[in-house]
Amino acid sequence: MQQRIRALNSAAPREEADYVLYWAQVNRRVQSNHALAYAAEAANEHRLPLLVYEGLTYDYPSANDRLHTFVLQGVAETAKAVKRLGAGYVFYARRREADRDDMLYRLAAKARCVVTDDYPVFLPARHNASVPAKIGIPYIAVDSSCIVPMSVHEKRAYGAYTIRPKIRRELPAHLKPVPPIRLRRRWRAELPAIGDLNPAACDIDHRVAPSLSYTGGYAAARRHLDRFLDQRLSRYAKESREPSRHATSNLSPYLHFGHISSLEVALAVREHAAEHKLIADEFLEELIVRRELAFNFARFTPKPESSEALPDWCRRTMKKHAKDKRPYLYTTRQFELAETHDALWNAAQKELLLRGTIHGYYRMYWGKKIIEWSRTYDQALEVMIHLHDVYALDGRDPNTYTNILWCFGLHDRPWGERPVFGQLRYMSLEGMRRKTDTEAYIAEIAEVERTGRDPWRI
């Protein structure tokens, strides 16, 4: 556990405290949560009850019905799970500018210490940089996002091949269940009601509809995991790069919002594979090595969403080819509305619009074509981040930024010189047609768009 813990200030604990406070910024769950377990240990050590706080505000960038709905769908379930533990639970939604913006500080005013999630990007990273100096009590960030803690790595890895050996060495020590939480003192005090969980009450963008494919919360995450184990894991190695075959886990939204942990997924996959004599190496490589490479990149990179984070060879080749003629040019709005000449690209963008995710293999093609059809590389990067920020349930995540920057050469190698891309890897429509059933995918997305229903929703 110690490798997961970072004290982000040096304040002394409050001696006359009413509870220990866990602020669930990222890991919005009870199950397999190291940060919650650490907070429970601190509460037990000082014979205090535990209070769990989860918040949601109207004014995060691109706040909309899709993102709000997914978070809110998990709240009642989390509240019940926290109550079963014997802890208190406060959920506060700041719905408009006039609403109070000090709930964390009000709760911290009676806490011995604040425990929260260690996360290297977006709002949690900003909060963990600014709040500790204001809180007046210990502020402790715990890594419950990665199986092998981020702190095990001392610097940014160049690629998967450099981080993989260390992860494999460290994995046996960390690929273990989180011990059950048992609180010595149950929460007895009355707490405010959760209130209205309808995003319509919030001053957010109501034009972006909820996903047709995903429901938020731990129970929904488990349904996806169980389906993956029962129907897809045996096919994953051969069919995961064929979008029309539906051989992937579809867990990325739940991992991003912390409704399920990568540790729980890995343990379940390992157990199922052993029981059924399956080889799960390819999936575990993606879940552990590739995902934690992304967290490593975000942890050790000042601006993980910027082209400044790219290797020197990437920036050199883009500078050399900056003035190359582009075969097509589209505006951000044309990209957003899937109004290009390419039916496969349009289908991938419509999957993002409708489902809130894009199949990983086609997302690479999607990103490469935005580079090819944008006036500048920086414009292409802005478009990709914007579309993920607004529509993706797995956006604003270390994986998001890493996958986007991979299109610009991050964690890749130089390839043969060609227009626009220079030495960046190129992906063609012809290649997609050779390797995947593009027509089946295009037809599937068209049917989802026509009916407004996703037959793969569970």
Image (spheres, helix red, strand yellow):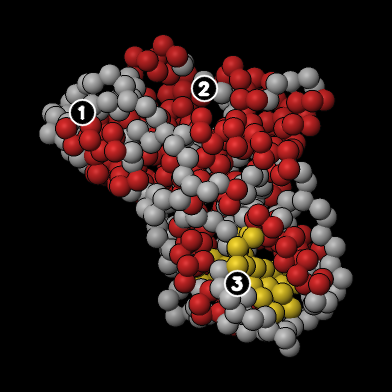
Q: Which residue is mark 1?
A: 420
> Which residue of the protein is positioned furthest toward the bottom in this rendering?
16
Mark 1 is on which residue type? Val
> Which residue of the protein is positioned furthest toward the top in this rendering?
434
Q: Position of residue 103 (x, y in %)?
A: 57, 78
Q: Which residue is mark 3?
A: 139
Left or right, residue 44 beside residue 297: right
Q: Which residue is mark 2?
A: 241
Q: Is residue 252 above or below residue 425?
A: below
Q: Residues within 10 Å of mark 3 (few under 14, many from 20)?
A: many
Mark 2 is on which residue type? Arg
Q: Is residue 158 above or below residue 257?
A: above
Quadrant of the rendering where the C terminus is positioned: top right
Residue in the image at 87% along x and 71% along y: 184
Question: Which circle, 3 or 2, is nearer the viewer?
Answer: 3
Q: CA distance from mark 1 to mark 2?
A: 26 Å
Residue in the image at 22% along x and 35% along y: 316
Q: Residues within 10 Å of mark 2 (few under 14, many from 20)?
A: some
Q: Position of residue 38 (x, y in %)?
A: 73, 63
Please tell me in which quadrant of the rendered image residue 93 appears.
bottom right
Residue sitting nearer the eye, 123 or 455: 123
The answer to whether the residue labelled 1 contacts the one labelled 3, judged by CB atoms less than 8 Å apart, is no
Q: CA distance from mark 3 to mark 2?
A: 43 Å
Quadrant of the rendering where the N terminus is positioned: bottom right
Earlier residue among tags 3 and 2:
3
Earlier residue among tags 1 and 2:
2
